[in-house]
Structures are given as structure tokens and as C-alpha cells.
Image: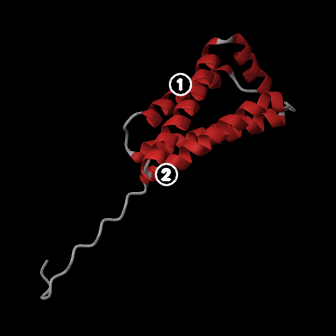
Amino acid sequence: MTRSKRITIGFWVVTALFCLQIGFTAYAQLSLPQVAAAFTHLGFPDYFREELSWAKFLGVVLLLAPVPARLKEWAYAGFAINLASAFIAHRAVGDGPEAWGWVVGTSVLWGLSYFFWRRLQVAPVPAAAPVLAGGHS
């Protein structure tokens, strides 16, 4: 198996797992009362929970769809901010690893997905065309 194929498979495996995790949390934020209560516990207003859920769904679509690299980069940046903010929020209210452990695990998936995606963006450098004597090619 070529290096490129291993990178592609690695990207799709970890990105699928990451998107499933984020998609599930977005769904849970919209539909489960205990998740809404967790947002209240963290001090966030209810509208933020809904806004964040829809932003997560949009980010998942951007990571999985064939869109320009700049849009994927913005999705990765948004997820990084979301994950860091979630970790900080849980720590700020005194939650233990049972609350913020999922954030750490999801962050590992995020990091691996981003790592593999960046490797896929590196295009091989084409060989230079030979230059004939006299300056014409």
C-alpha cells in the first residue's frame, strides 16, 4: 500500500469518527434535556446551545463534502475553538475528567483528522521540464 493511500485511509477513518462524535453531540445538544442542563451548568444561555449545534452540523458537512480547502480550514479552526472552549468551561466550573474527558478524546480525533488532511494537501512537486540549448523548450 502506498504512503498516499495510507494517509487517505487514515484521514477518512479518523475524520468519520470525529464527525460522528461531533454530529452526535450536536444532536444531543438539540434534543436531550440533560445536555441542555449541562449547558446551564456551564453558564451558557440556551440560544448558544442551539447556535453551537447548528454550527457543528455545518462544520461536519464542510469536513465531509468536496469544498475548497479554505472552507475546510475554517471548519477545523471552528472545531478547535469549540473544543478548547468546552475544556476551559468544564474546568472553570470545577468539573472532573468524567465531564471533560470526552472533550480530550474528541480533540485527539480532531488533531489526527487535521494532521492527515494537511498531509493530503501536500502535492508532489512535478519534475522540471528539460531546457534545450538555445533557451527553447
Mark 1 burial class by Cα count in 10 Å: few <14, some 14-19, many 20+: some
- Which numbered tag is attached to residue 54? 1
Q: What percent of the width, then of the height, locates residue 38?
A: 75, 21
Q: Is residue 125 left or right of residue 43?
A: left
Q: Is residue 41 above or below residue 73?
A: above
Q: Nearer the viewer, residue 33 or 120?
A: 120
Q: What percent of the width, then of the height, locates residue 58?
A: 48, 29
Q: Is residue 42 left or right of residue 11?
A: right
Quadrant of the rendered image containing residue 137: bottom left
Q: What percent of the width, then of the height, locates residue 102?
A: 72, 31
Residue, disc 2: 118
Mark 1: secondary structure: helix
Mark 2: secondary structure: helix
- Residue at 53% of width from left, 29% of height from top? 55
Q: Which amino acid type is marked by label 1?
A: Trp
Q: Nearer the viewer, residue 109 or 36?
A: 109
| Residue 75 visible in the current orientation | yes
Q: Is residue 85 left or right of residue 23?
A: right
Mark 2 burial class by Cα count in 10 Å: few <14, some 14-19, many 20+: some
Q: Residue furthest front?
A: 1
Q: Nearer the viewer, residue 94 or 44?
A: 94
Q: Is residue 53 above or below residue 126?
A: above
User: Are the residues flagged by discs 2 and 1 in contact, CB closer than 8 Å?
Assistant: no
Q: Which amino acid type is marked by label 2?
A: Arg
